[in-house]
């Protein structure tokens, strides 16, 4: 098994290297970035399994960066703040971060939180059904029901619906959707996704006419509209 890659975004060199040392000795591979303006290109070029994201940075700050990363990636993010009272404000911003840590922290605690998040991620299969409005997705049975009647879906349509339903109202790019449902040839994939979405919508619309369950976000991708509730 290859070791998980952690990106440390931190401009204080001492903290960055301390975190790096602890994470490496826990078996992780790490890279660091100390300037906010270089984070996005680095994340795109060399995707990591988790990002430790300091808030106060030269250039773009951690809040802006978290928002930007969430436009194209679901990578777990732990935000690092210098003020404990800031955590409430951050939670209120709904940035989509997975955890928050306040300075000063013990590196051991950071490693423990990193491990916890990665573990949670790997225990992926849904233990419960996803239920939104009258739509119920049963992951174990690989089945979707609308008003208790089975909706007949192809595996790709099921996969797309599951990804979007697991994070309602979050916009997924076509690329992300492809990565999540996997196992495709990449030839002309944009169109392929569009076709699956079109078919999925049609099937849902037959049961729930007039409701926009899957919305197109122009220039970005698709989302499951939880307003359907
Ligand atoms: Ca800082």
Image (spheres, grey):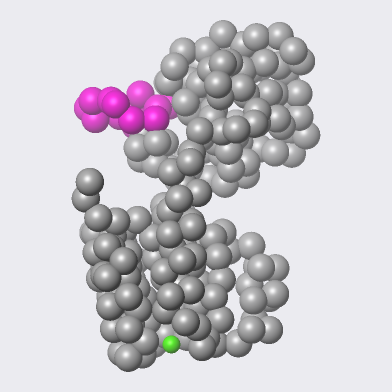
Quadrant hosting residue 25:
bottom left
Quadrant hosting residue 90:
bottom right
The quadrant where ligand 1 appears is bottom left
* Image coordinates for residue 89, horizontal then vertical, percent: 68, 76
Residue 36 at least partly seen: no
63 versus 202 height, above or below: below
Quadrant hosting residue 46:
bottom left
* Image coordinates for residue 17, horizontal then vertical, percent: 29, 83
Count the marks: 0
Q: Is residue 213 magenta?
A: no
Residue displayed at 51% across by 33% down: 125
Residue 98 at least partly seen: yes
Q: Give the extent of the magenta segment.
A: 181-194
Front one among 29 and 179:
29
Image quadrant where one finds the C terminus: top right
Residue displayed at 43% across by 20% down: 156
């Amino acid at each position: 098994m290859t070791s998980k890659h952690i990106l440390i975004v931190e401009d204080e060199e001492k903290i960055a290297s301390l975190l790096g040392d602890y994470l490496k000795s826990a078996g992780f591979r790490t890279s660091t970035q100390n300037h906010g303006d270089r984070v996005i290109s680095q994340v795109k070029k060399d995707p990591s399994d988790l990002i430790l994201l300091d808030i106060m940075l030269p250039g773009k700050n951690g809040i802006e960066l978290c928002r930007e990363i969430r436009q194209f990636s679901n990578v777990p993010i732990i935000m690092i703040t210098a003020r404990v009272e800031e955590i409430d404000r951050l939670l209120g911003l709904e940035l989509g971060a997975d955890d928050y840590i306040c300075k000063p922290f013990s590196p051991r605690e950071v490693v423990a939180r990193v491990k916890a998040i990665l573990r949670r991620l790997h225990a992926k299969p849904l233990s419960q059904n996803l239920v939104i409005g009258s739509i119920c997705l049963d992951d174990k049975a690989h089945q979707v029901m609308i008003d208790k009647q089975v909706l007949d879906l192809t595996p790709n349509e099921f996969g797309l619906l599951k990804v979007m339903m697991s994070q309602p109202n979050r916009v997924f790019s076509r690329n992300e959707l492809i990565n999540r449902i996997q196992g495709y040839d990449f030839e002309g994939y944009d169109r392929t996704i569009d076709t699956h979405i079109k078919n999925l919508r049609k099937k849902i619309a037959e049961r729930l006419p007039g409701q926009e369950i899957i919305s197109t976000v122009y220039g970005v991708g698709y989302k499951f509209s939880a307003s359907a509730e």
